Image (spheres, grey):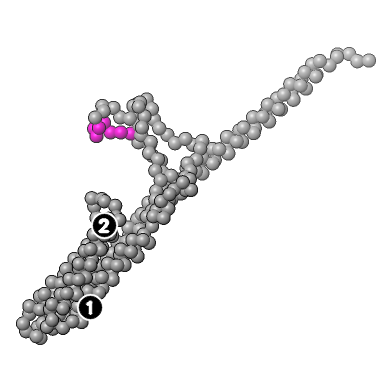
Amino acid sequence: MSDWTNKLVAFEKDLRKADTIRPETFTADQEWYLCRHVVTEATSTVKTEGSSANDYPLYHIKCHVKRKNGYYLWNIAMIIFLIDILSFCSFSVEISSPSDRLSVTLTLLLTAVAFKFVVSQSLPTISYLTLLDKYVLSGLVFLCCMAIENAVAASILDPDTQKSFDRISLYFGIGCFLVIHIVAVAFVITKSRTRNKKLLESEKRFRETLQLVNKLTKERQQKLTQEPAKEHDTSDQDKITFVEASRPQGGS
């Protein structure tokens, strides 16, 4: 940001030098992938959003990073997946033993809640829900629904109705489980493609700017090599003219 207003100063990209990134100084490469392009943008402040009565030029220099999702995939998402799928084991317990059924489901629910508490300490504190947060919360809601189903099935007195309700709940639970994970995978793929598309556009603009800088550099080098040659030719012509002018008029 400049101390002068945008009426006096305007920032522009210096096309005499290309932007570069030094990846060897990047220390968070275990968690993040550093992209090799740089994004620059010349803007200005908006006086309606600040306390100043003038607008000042700004020049943003950005580099993009992508989070490596291997740690979160295997250490968080996979654990929640296993806890959710183990909840179907409660259907192997007889309906006549609701306490045993509920002990299985509630134990898994308490395990998931404790795991969520531990995981939240390693995740960034932000005000919105990420895809991983939504997936973990959906797993907790699924376990709560399974516990409610076990309690409702135990409260039905008619044995035939009880078995029918339990079988329908099992099929419905499997369907919900599949839908949750299909939607989660679809969201991950869609978001990943959108992110990669934006990164490719930024990289394309960076390469175009880099080609322009290289082209202008070659033109400057050609001009520098041509100027000494012109000066050399001019000096030779001056020498020839001087010799011809100093040659005597008569000869013996």
Looking at the rendering, the stretch of residues picked out in magenta corresponds to 44-50
Q: Is 141 one of the magenta-colored residues?
A: no
Q: Position of residue 179 (x, y in %)?
A: 25, 69
Say which of 42 and 140 sits in front.
140
In the rendered image, the quadrant that contains the N terminus is top left
Q: At 29% from the left edge and 52% from the top edge, which residue is drawn?
A: 124
Verify CB contact (< 8 Å) between mark 1 and mark 2.
no
Judge left or right: residue 122 versus residue 213. left
Circle 1 residues within 10 Å: few <14, some 14–19, many ≥20: few
Q: Position of residue 13 (x, y in %)?
A: 44, 36
Residue under label 2: 120
Which of the pair 149/97 is nearer the observer? 97
For label 1, the residue is 89
Coordinates of residue 42 in the picture (x, y in percent) = 38, 36
Going by the image, does 41 lie left or right of 111? right
* Residue 154 appears left or right of 31: left
Quadrant position of residue 48: top left
